[in-house]
Image (cartoon, rainbow, N blue to C red):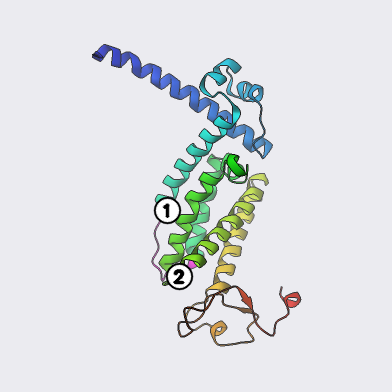
Amino acid sequence: MVTLMQELRTVPRQRRSQQSIDAILDAAERLIHDQGQVSFTANELAVEASMSIGRVYYWFPDMPRVVTALAERATQRLRELLDGLKRYEPTDSAPLLLADAISTLCEHIDANPSTVALCLSGSGPRDYGAVVRECVVPAAVTMLRERIPGLPDVEAELVARTAVDITLGMLHEYLGASAERRPIIQQELVYVLSSWLHSRYPQVGDVAWSDSLYPIQPSRMPSQVDPRMPVYPALSPHQHPATVR
């Protein structure tokens, strides 16, 4: 039987163990941010974590396991962030919702700078970012469904993944920018997503629904159109792609 004293002795060891693991993951996060990719060595990690390489290997037998653990931690933190996002009514301004969500996300990225690089790193069995990306897509799908009733599953998935890809690409630029330029990129991301979603899903009564010559036609058809018809992004039939700006 484990005595209370043994339990009390175990707690500090567990705490120290977690501190060592966190120190290694924090060091890995800094290296990924500095290098812009997952390419650090065990020696670099040991130096950055201020511990012996043997200590690093004690907790993580190889570097892929370090990155996997870091991705899991990033996913948990990101999921908590998404769960805590302010909820808006479907009638509220989409740009307002996006501005609030992007601002919160940028603050999170400032504090967790390896998140974007993790999302964009790896492939196949070592697609480290898959678990991180896959926690964001459902949140984007939920936001879309709250504002666009009856959205087909395939379309919701396509639009959500496109929005996530756009966001990750611009956040990659955001992280590489100076402190003075970051707010500009943040605002541009809000503008890009807002204008794209507005073109794709105009409000009821918007001229885009009734004007067949409107430069960029809505992607989602009006309610009177047969819902079994495929829905795709489409330019006006009379608009040549080269003339679109």
Range of the magenta residues?
A: 85-94
10 Å neighbourhood of mark 1: few (<14), some, or many (≥20)? few
Q: Label 1 sits on what residue type? A: Leu
Quadrant location of the C terminus in the rendered image: bottom right
Q: Label 1, on which residue?
A: 85
Residue 236: % across, % down: 65, 82
Q: Label 2 sits on what residue type? A: Leu
Residue at screen point 34% across, 16% down? 10
CB under 8 Å between discs 2 and 1: no
Magenta residues, dominant SS class: loop
Residue 67: % across, % down: 57, 34
89 magenta-colored: yes
Dot 1: what SS? loop
Quadrant location of the N terminus in the rendered image: top left
Which is in the foreground here, disc 2 or disc 1? Answer: 2
Seen in the picture, residue 160 relative to 69 is either above or below; the reply is below
222 magenta-colored: no
Residue at screen point 66% across, 36% down? 34
Whole-angstrom CA distance, mark 2 to mark 1, is 22 Å
10 Å neighbourhood of mark 2: few (<14), some, or many (≥20)? some
Residue 100: % across, % down: 48, 57
**Which labelled disc corresponds to residue 151?**
2
Dot 2: what SS? loop
Residue at screen point 55% across, 87% down? 210
Residue 209: % across, % down: 54, 83
